[in-house]
Image (spheres, rainbow, N blue to C red):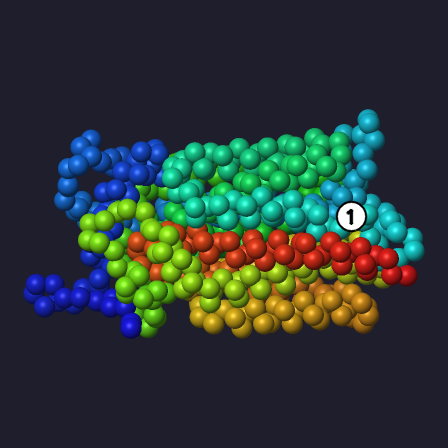
Amino acid sequence: MQRRTRSWDGNGALIPLTCLRPSSVPLEPTLRELDAMGGCAGSPRRLSDSEGEETDPAPRPPLQDSQGAHWKNAVGFWLLGLCNNFSYVVMLSAAHDILSHQRTAGNQSHVDPDPTPTSHNSSSRFDCNPVSTAAVLLADILPTLIIKLLAPLGLHLLPYSPRVLTSGICAAGSFLLVAFSHSVMISLCGVVLASISSGLGEVTFLSLTAFYPRAVISCWSSGTGGAGLLGALSYLGLTQAGLSPQHTLLSMLGIPTLLLASYFLLLTSPGPQDPRGEEDSDTAARQPLINNEASESKPGSGSPLSLQERWTVFKGLLHYIVPLVLVYFAEYFINQGLFELLFFRNTFLTHAEQYRWYQMLYQAGVFASRSSLRCCPIRHTWVLALLQCLNLAFLLVDVWLSFLPSIYLIFLIIVFEGLLGGAAYVNTFHNIALETSDEHREFAMATACISDTLGISLSGLLALPLHDFLCQLT
């Protein structure tokens, strides 16, 4: 049964239902919750001190003010996506350096940005580190997986502001710990802090989009893609320019500050969602993720979802969760399991430089596709999963047989890989936002964001034994 997206006013004029306040989700409790945590920003709007008093909805703000708030929120969510994923991306870009650096007692820098490409395993035809870069991937993703698994159970009880503060502090701590570490294990602890920051931030900000117009999802996704591109490109550029990895990481300490400023100073307090600019015709053509019986709640009820409702919503999300898991499994198996082994000796780039270029080109593809939602929406995300798995199979065969003659062919495949991954991410969350009711959207977004993390974790676990097996080949 299709969801109705229009209704009529008393004069017979056609109006969108999205302009109407849902009876099952009263606005005031949501605003009280956000106000109690300090609000999303420095907005002057505050609620009545009377908890039980019902107030009339605020009048629609002037068009100019509404447009100003729209742009502030759009820029705010873009910056939040950028800052939230920045440390995560930088740690993956630095994975080869973290694992290959051998520090002496008096050496206060990481590896030489242009190391001599000597093989760590002289008996192997690959230039292998003793430990796969998948180890850094696991340190960068397993804490995120734990956070996302626990988030639907009770993270919503913690106000947004403390979550954002924790995320910013962990991001800053990760840069400092990796920059000043004296061993691989200490560096991996810093990577864990980056994972906690990214995972907690993603759950928090995706849940927060439920209180804003759906357009902010596209801004968030584009920002996360920008984090990939700018993070990988900045690490590549600064190290190529001769800056040590240690000083490169220290130069990025302004990113956590920008994260906090974007949340506390830029975002406006969420109000009634303005349907202007939303694709009503697209919404009308879609089916809800769950049936009416599960989606209907008692009028005036603002209580948390029951376990039965959560399970029903989760089952409705599976046809989006499974393809996204497959996409991220395939692409991160390539990134952290095969990138290190796709080493071309007949090029001017060293092994470490090749790895950094792979990461940067992948992130460039991700950024382009995560920013393409309005011009290229995709409903059937399983097609992207199929293409990504074919990418994995092709590159795995090349690692085994080494039949591709040029690194530039690998560059093209990696850009295509990034395009598929970014498109899968942004279209999955956009489709979920369209197909969930208002009362279920916050839970649905927090639950679906486990998909990419689960796929990445599985790829890291399988990439470790593959690395050891291939590096033993002569």
Q: Is residue 181 above or below residue 31?
A: above
Residue at 42% x, 54% y: name it: 445
Element at badge 1?
Answer: loop
Identify residue type, mark 1.
Val
Q: Nearer the viewer, residue 115 or 445?
A: 445
Q: Position of residue 405 (x, y in %)?
A: 80, 70
Residue at 26% x, 47% y: name it: 302
Viewer can see residue 64: no
Number of numbered discs: 1
Residue at 29% x, 50% y: name it: 67
Residue at 7% x, 65% y: name it: 11
Q: Is residue 298 above or below residue 29?
A: below
Task: Determine which quarter of the picture holds residue 466.
Answer: bottom right
Task: Determine which quarter of the picture holds residue 115.
Answer: top right
Q: Position of residue 248 (x, y in %)?
A: 67, 38
Residue found farthest to the top: 106
Q: Quadrant of the N terminus?
A: bottom left
411 displayed left or right of 199: right
Q: Is residue 388 above or below residue 112?
A: below
Categorize mark 1 by other alpha carbons within 10 Å: few (<14), some (14-19), many (20+): some
Residue found farthest to the right: 123
Q: Position of residue 463 (x, y in %)?
A: 71, 57
Q: Position of residue 70 (x, y in %)?
A: 33, 50
Q: Quadrant of the C terminus?
A: bottom right
Residue found farthest to the left: 11
90 displayed left or right of 404: left
Viewer can see residue 422: yes
Task: Determine which quarter of the picture holds residue 87.
Answer: top right
Residue under pointer 1? 131
